[in-house]
Amino acid sequence: MYESLKGRIVLMTGGSRGLGRDMALALAAAGARVAITGRSDSQSLKDAVAEIAAQSGKDSVLGLVADVRSMDECTRAVNRTIAHFGRVDVLVNNAGMGMRGISESYMEVPPRFYDADPAVWDDIVATNVNGMFYMSRIAVPPMVARGFGKVINISTSTGVLTRKGLSPYGPSKAAMESLSRIWANDLEGTGVDVNVFLPGAATDTDILPESRRRAGNMLPVSVMRPGILWLCADESNGMTGGRYVARLWDPKLPPAQAAAGASEKLFA
């Protein structure tokens, strides 16, 4: 569908599982070459690389161990992607931590902010906020120098940002959304677009407790596919500072109309 995705280089953080893995598979199937990161040299990272390679060819994927909480590891991940593929066209800041480290029962018994383990609090904020900054700080300047690039930050539903018991996860995503809007303004006129993309409801990934996943009524990870393809393709060039909800994306519509229908404003 999108000719511009053929050969496009996408760096996907948190690409070993969940939303990141499925988005990487969709992009590789469309002709992109993808670098995916995982926090450790896990079996899930190896399996994701193998799955993408089996689908789209071994030259289409690069697996990277990178803990986005570390500036040094983010720098290595970007530099290795550039060394391997020649550049980074699109950065998808998908790596994230949810509330399970605070409490496995947070959905049934909302924890109070002052009951949170400070070390886990720090990990969530470092992953969800600092990680997107570190990766973008290294990946964006070469995009600006070339006059082209895209940064796509994966967020969560509006209600989650301020919901009782979801601190610090909700506030960390609120920070991501605010930073995305500011960065879009910072990069105006450079050819580098910054947008927010989110599922729009609870999605079947292990960021949620097993009890919630067993209950069902969740979106499949594939809900992200139509939107991520458009956001990474030339058809979205110049669209910046936006917030797009995958659940609202109607794949039966022409892509521009589908994008407009999935657009949602968080800030005035």
Image (cartoon, grey):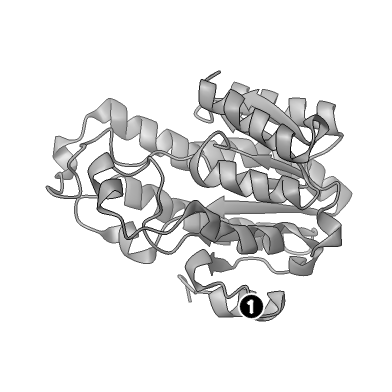
Residue where numbered disc 1 is placed: 252
Q: Quadrant of the N terminus?
A: bottom right
In this picture, residue 195 sits left or right of residue 208:
right
In the current view of this chain or complex, which residue is farthest to the left?
109
Say if 67 sits above or below 149 in the image. above
Q: Is residue 73 left or right of residue 143?
A: left
> In this rendering, is residue 236 above or below 187?
below
Return the x and y of residue 234 as percentages of the image width and height. Answer: 81, 63
Q: Residue 187 falls in which quadrant of the image?
A: bottom right
Q: Please identify the quarter of the rendering in which residue 2 is found.
A: bottom right
Could you say which quadrant of the image residue 139 lies in? top right
Please say if 165 is above or below 191: above
> Within 10 Å of the Cα at label 1, are there few (<14), some (14-19), or many (20+) other Cα atoms?
few
Mark 1 is on which residue type? Lys
In the image, residue 164 lies at what x, y percent? 19, 56
- Residue toward you, 170 or 3: 3
The residue positioned 72% from the left and 63% from the top of the image is 188
Answer with left or right where residue 141 lies relative to residue 135.
right
Residue 71 visible in the shown view:
no
- The residue lying toward the viewer, choosing from 158 and 28, is 28
Does 217 appear above or below 102? below
Identify the residue at image location x=52%, y=60%. 223
